[in-house]
Image (spheres, rainbow, N blue to C red):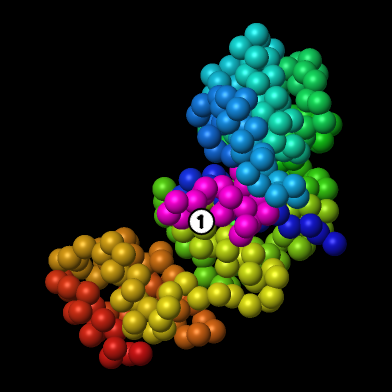
Amino acid sequence: MTEYFVGTGGWSYFRVPRQSSLKVYSAVFNFVEVNYTFYKYPTARMVQRWRRTVPEDFMFTVRCHQDLTHRSGLKPVDEAFEALSRMISVCKTLKAPFLHLLSPSSHVFGAKGVEQAKDFFDSVNLKGVRLAWEVRGSMTADLVKLMEDLHIVHSVDISKEAPRVQSDVLYTRIFGKGKHNIYQFTDGELEKLDADVVASAVQRAIISWHGVKMTSDAARFKKFKETGKFIPVTAFTGVDSAKAVLQEDARFPSTRTELIRHQGWKVIDLTAEKRIHLSQLLSRMPEKTYRSIQEVTKELEVFL
């Protein structure tokens, strides 16, 4: 049976007045991917505080600093060894079993690049920490073989593609189908994603949600795994649910096309049991300029 770890990239958006965001977050989710370490090296005291804040069975994973993946480029040079050593130290303090590497699309691993990466990995002591590697450039056959030989987990967004490297672990970072991480998942899409996880038959599934609605999507997915049911995204249904999500940041005047582009990716509660993308309703409206939310909701009432 697959063991699920569901959470988000970082906890800073999980804000509760006068309380530790991480402490409150860890009462809801059983895992977090530390994003801070991609941009900065945390102090030892900071990392120790993170570990003390959460329950013993809470799992961290750590994003590797960009010094290694974007600057040194996984080559056997002093700067790369130093960056990795610092990241392994963070992992050990957090009891994090995985260090996540992200190679940018500009970094193409040809035969020479793969050989350099092999030399680098062969020269380091990971101290029991396992690597999950997200390659945004092309996945060559040589790179796939390297990851297979070293038991590196191929990290992908499983809502878009399947891992190229077979593993006992799935490490997926979910961004969705929209541009610039602007997307929200319907119930059906979450069910499809889970079906893909189940079909992978892994022992451990680490699911890190990203994007503007990552906390909501992660919570809905987690609840579905626990109960088989989905929680609503608003406190309303139908037109009132559409009105609630439009009130978040919709700007007027806007044409129907503009509303679909800027608001259609959001999910509303069509009924208590069914959630859809707002675009499914907005696309049924006449193409004209709307000057207020009231004009939009009045139009929607015609066919709801």
How many labels, in total? 1
Was residue 22 drawn as part of the magenta stretch in this picture? Answer: yes
The residue lying toward the viewer, choosing from 68 and 159, is 68
Q: Where is mark 1, residue-wise?
A: 214
Up/down of 245 relative to 13, above or below: below
Q: Which residues are magenta?
A: 16-33
Circle 1 crowding by C-alpha within 10 Å: few under 14, some 14–19, many from 20: many
The residue lying toward the viewer, choosing from 102 and 4, is 4
Please state the horizontal and vertical placement of residue 295, each as a whole percent of the image: 19, 79
Q: Residue at x 65, y 32 (%)?
A: 48
Q: Amino acid at mark 1?
A: Met
Q: Quadrant of residue 220?
A: bottom right
Relative to 106, 116 lies left or right? right
Relative to 218, 198 lies left or right? right
Q: Quadrant of residue 77?
A: top right
Q: Residue at x 33, y 90 (%)?
A: 303
Please state the horizontal and vertical placement of residue 226, each as a whole percent of the image: 70, 70
Q: Residue at x 41, y 83 (%)?
A: 237
